[in-house]
Image (cartoon, coloured by chain):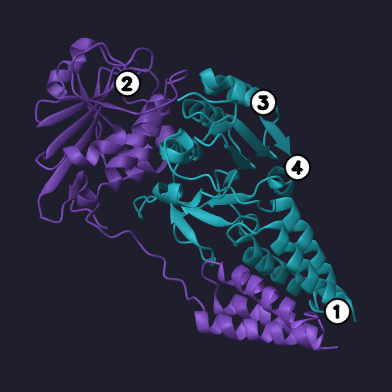
Chain colours: A cyan, B purple
């Protein structure tokens, strides 16, 4: 296969899949570098990093990236996860299998079944020590899990990224064989966030949350519910805005 | 799944597969350690090393192996590849796709098709700088290849091992069938319908729909949005009921 450009994988119809890897608060430069290298091996190069622990640019990351050093040099740094994913239509959160959060999950080898209508995809990985927080997961559509031995399920960060990139590279659609095209016009994470802000402020104005503690819990829960929707169109989002506007109309 | 013993994967028929990873002349302790860790993640722990470049035991290997340190501690060191593979029935040589050698090859994701009649399997990986020599490959039965971008096909050693272990772990026979299903307590379609009725009646009472035609279209749209959520818990549904109740509270 050949790639039309850096971070897009060409489909037969000529439409592109735009896939990025997002690292939230990565701690080790070596892991960031190893991630960049394996992304390059599998034809991806949009790397986004939210608040790396160490200074950036990072020499250790560059050294470990080997032939993927351009991925490191072009990596974008963000202060918040919200900014990093604002242009994405769909974001997978990577997590170990048994999370006490009700979010639909798939296994890594099932990723091919989920991509048909998504053009701008993100795959989010958490910090080495503790993975993703529930708050971070609540911003994502779905959890993706790598099946491992239950007695020792802690994968190295770069190894987890390796497996996901490898599985993406195997997907026939992305590689340019058959199927798929019907790219529906989907709302981005940024548009969803605007809706959620609208909802929260309306609920607030009607005294829904009662206390700050309850507000924190409820907004996370609602974020989780709405971000879990598989691709929502701008029209549908408008309908939801309409409902919220009714709230404001006391 | 549970394993009968350290390095055997149980098959449904009751026979055991005995699989080892063999590293020929590995150079970096870090890679050996990362290999041990990911072997452990995927239920393998027979690691054999032919003439490591650096002294053994190797501190860097131990440090990188994390929870797989027992794999490092039990690793066997050999002077020659012949000794290391002498008890194997079948050995795969890992190599980049286009080798100027007339040896049958398979892709990593095809490994499941080759294991039926093999009990004692070895997977051989070459040194970081130059891979396996033709002489080493000639001792193996078959080449196994990981499909990568042709412009940058150089996988890190531990990443290549990661992918092979991952693929082995996916083989149903080896896994002994059952992938864990995380049975979350989910709301039923009937409970969702009760929520939707609640929502529609509240919207109606606030004059949201304006005309019957618009009502038909909007309810269908909203039904679509909410039913698209893959699995919502009763608690989450309660939160949504709470929002709707605010609508009624004029």
Image quadrant in which you'd find residue B205: bottom right
Q: Nearer the viewer, mark 3 or mark 4?
A: 3
Q: Kindly state the secondary structure of the residue where label 1 is placed.
A: loop
Check disc 4 and report its element: helix, strand or loop: loop
Q: Gap between marks 4 and 2, in whole Å?
A: 41 Å
- Residue carrying label 3: A74
| Quadrant placement of the C terminus of chain B | bottom right
Give the spatial CA distance, label 1 vs label 4: 32 Å
Q: Are marks 2 and 3 on the same chain?
A: no
Read off the chain for label 1: A
Q: Which residue is mark 2?
A: B97
- Residue A146 seen in render: yes
Picture residue at 76% right of the left edge, 85% below the top:
B204
The mark closer to the camera, 2 or 1, is 2
Measure the C-alpha gap from mark 3 to mark 4: 16 Å
Q: Secondary structure at mark 3?
A: helix
The label shown at residue A79 is: 4
Q: Are marks 2 and 1 on the same chain?
A: no
Q: Position of residue A65 (x, y in %)?
A: 54, 23
Q: Residues within 10 Å of mark 2 (few under 14, many from 20)?
A: some
Mark 3, residues whose alpha carbon is within 10 Å: few (<14), some, or many (≥20)? few
Secondary structure beneath label 2: loop
Q: Are the residues under badges 4 and 2 in a single subunit?
A: no
* Res B102 quadrant in image: top left
Task: Name the spot of residue B111 as percent of width and height, x first.
Answer: 24, 37
- Viewer-side residue, B187 vs A6: A6
């Amino acid at each position: 296969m050949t790639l039309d450009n850096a971070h897009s994988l060409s489909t037969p119809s000529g439409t592109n899949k735009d896939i990025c890897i997002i690292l939230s608060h990565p701690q080790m430069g070596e892991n960031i570098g190893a991630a960049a290298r394996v992304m390059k091996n599998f034809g991806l190069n949009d790397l986004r990093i939210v608040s790396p622990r160490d200074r950036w640019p990072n020499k250790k990351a560059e050294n470990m990236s080997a032939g993927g050093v351009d991925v490191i040099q072009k990596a974008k740094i963000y202060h918040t996860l919200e900014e990093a994913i604002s242009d994405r239509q769909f974001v997978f959160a990577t997590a170990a299998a048994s999370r006490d959060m009700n979010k639909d999950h798939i296994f890594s080898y099932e990723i091919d079944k989920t991509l048909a209508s998504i053009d701008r995809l993100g795959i989010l990985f958490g910090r080495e020590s503790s993975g993703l927080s529930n708050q971070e997961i609540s911003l994502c559509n779905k959890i993706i899990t790598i099946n491992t031995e239950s007695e020792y399920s802690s994968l190295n960060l770069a190894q987890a990224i390796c497996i996901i990139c490898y599985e993406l590279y195997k997907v026939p659609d992305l590689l340019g064989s058959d199927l798929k095209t019907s790219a529906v016009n989907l709302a981005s994470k940024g548009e969803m966030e605007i809706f959620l802000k609208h909802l929260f402020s309306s609920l607030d104005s009607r005294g829904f949350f009662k206390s700050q503690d309850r507000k924190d819990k409820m907004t996370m829960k609602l974020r989780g519910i709405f971000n879990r929707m598989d691709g929502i169109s701008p029209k549908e989002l408008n309908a939801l805005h309409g409902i919220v506007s009714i709230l404001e109309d006391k």
